[in-house]
Amino acid sequence: MTARSLAWRVERACAAAYPPRVVERIGGWSVARSGGGSRRSNAASAIAADAALDHDTLAAIAARYAADARPTILRLTDLAPVASGVLDAGGFIAPEGHSRTLLRDASFSNRVAGEVRIGEAPDAMWLAARRRLSPGIEEPRDVAARLAHPAAYASRELRGRTVAIGYVCMHHGVAVLEAIATEPGARRYGHGGAIVAALIDWADAQGAEEIALQVEEANTPARALYARLGFTVDLYGYHYRRSGPCPTLA
């Protein structure tokens, strides 16, 4: 498998691990709409290496978001043709949310220990922690209900309070880690590392061929943690361009 085909395989798995409420294909683009929450679940992404963005395609994408009274958001990866010219001409604001897609080096051993609770569905405590640690996101119960592939949800508790969470979703041999978060006052005590290690263990037990995650470039602490746990292969990057500000989409 070439590096390019592997990257597209991981890109498809990442999309499956955080499914939007509505998704529609326009040309070579997947137009995701969830009506709130993150940019990712309300953005259009290329689904093929030849997914060019011309003025007609952009207009058709924009019409879908206009129907929901939302800004048009494009998620632009390194895997598809550059679309900056069309977006600049359309008055889209500067790139934001620069992120990297990282693959775990299979030669790393999983050595982070810690008591972690893990299950195939998010329980009430996991859901409450997700809402608390990521305020303003789409209802996590709804996102979990839309997952069409095997998943596992991990949480770590301290004195009866959930201080760290995350989940992993398996898509055709690629395991994608999502929603890794630690309560601010509990950081730097190994809770996040224990969550990631537990999700890696689950993925290995499920026979994952690859394990991946996506992280913002500017999140230095998270990137350092992931590097210590073997996520050292940088597959590709992406960023967002939007037609205008929207305070409800982070």
Image (cartoon, rainbow, N blue to C red):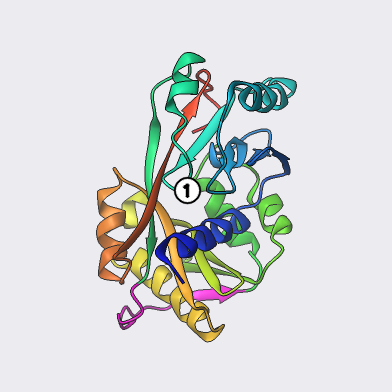
What is the secondary structure assignment of the residue under circle 1? helix
Which image quadrant is residue 191 in? bottom left
Main SS of the magenta part reads loop
Quadrant for residue 55, please give it. Answer: top right
Instruction: Determine whether, in the image, residue 117 is placed left or right of residue 31.
Output: left
Side (left or right) of 223 relative to 95: left
Residue nearest the viewer, comparing 155 with 37: 37
Q: Which residue is mark 1?
A: 133
Q: Position of residue 45 (x, y in %)?
A: 57, 41
From this view, report whether residue 93 is shown above or below residue 115: above
Q: Quadrant of residue 3?
A: bottom left
Residue found 39% across the figure and 23% down from its top = 94
From the top left corner, tell me how far across and down residue 43 is, in percent: 58, 36
Q: What segment carries the magenta color?
A: 105-119
The verdict on residue 220 being magenta is no
Residue found farthest to the front: 50
Q: Amino acid at mark 1?
A: Leu
Residue at (75, 22) in percent of width and height: 67
Image coordinates of residue 151 in percent, x first then y, are 62, 69
